[in-house]
Image: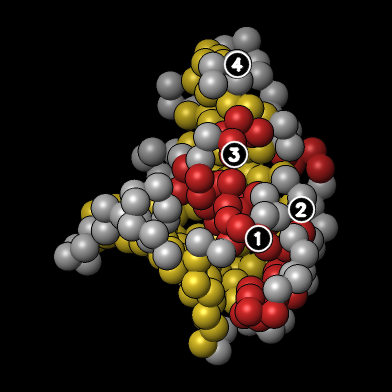
Amino acid sequence: MKLFIYFFCLIVFLSSSICVVHSLEPYCVLKNRLNLINNLYVHFVQKINFCNMKEIELIRGELWIKRPNLFYCHVMGSQESFLISDGKTLWFYVPTIKQVTAYCLENIISNNVFLQLLFMSNTNIWQDYTITQKKDWFYFKSSYDDGKHIKQFKIKITDRGIIDQFSIIQENKQHIDYYLSNQCVNLINQDKFCFTLSDDIQLDDQRMKF
């Protein structure tokens, strides 16, 4: 589940934070490009590889994002699932077993270093990463090797705000790539990000368990 949150958080944080440090110029360029996006719909393909680059998992789906904190992800196929943020609660729903897990969005952020990095406009956090730009690619590399930081991540976005790819390299050498297509930035109705809990769905409520 957390792999889908990474992409969501990167857009939300970079689009809303303030660029104040000259040495972070590539970050400012990226922020300005992401500021072109208020609503986002894309098709995505997620590929997960280990250090030997052997593909171990392939996932397809659709993604809707509405700033500042609304998110709807539909994973297709035999392992169909939905990940929905209504701004307060993060719902993870698996229709095949009629079960939904509810998380407090704020708690999810506060218990994850990567999500703190992406949601909090704290320049000290960003100083833990070296940020560089090469054409439409923006690279983030951790200054630490402590297992608490995402080792590297990168995003490819054009000067028109079109996001093509997003990648993460974790400390365990796991490599996660997202390939995006059919991007649309039309207005998305707020109702898209509501989850309705019906009587036939079992609720696992984790909102008070942090």
Q: Earlier in the sequence, mark 1 or mark 2?
A: 2
Confirm whether residue 166 shows in the render.
no
Q: Amino acid at mark 1?
A: Thr
Task: Tell me how far mark 3 sits from mark 4, CA to CA.
Answer: 14 Å
Quick check: 37 above or below 26? above
What residue does disc 2 label?
Answer: 67
Q: How many marks?
A: 4
In the rendered structure, find residue 15 and report the number of the disc placed on it. none
Q: Earlier in the sequence, mark 3 or mark 4?
A: 3
**Residue depicted at 21% across the width and 63% down the height:** 51
In the rendered structure, find residue 208 and report the number of the disc placed on it. 4
Q: Earlier in the sequence, mark 3 or mark 1?
A: 3
Q: Which label sits in the foreground, 4 or 1? A: 1
**Numbered disc 4: secondary structure:** loop
**Numbered disc 1: secondary structure:** helix
Q: Quadrant of the C terminus?
A: top right
**Residue depicted at 65% across the width and 16% down the height:** 198
Q: Earlier in the sequence, mark 4 or mark 2?
A: 2
What residue does disc 1 label?
Answer: 123
Horizontal and vertical percent for residue 152? Answer: 41, 65
Q: Amino acid at mark 2?
A: Arg
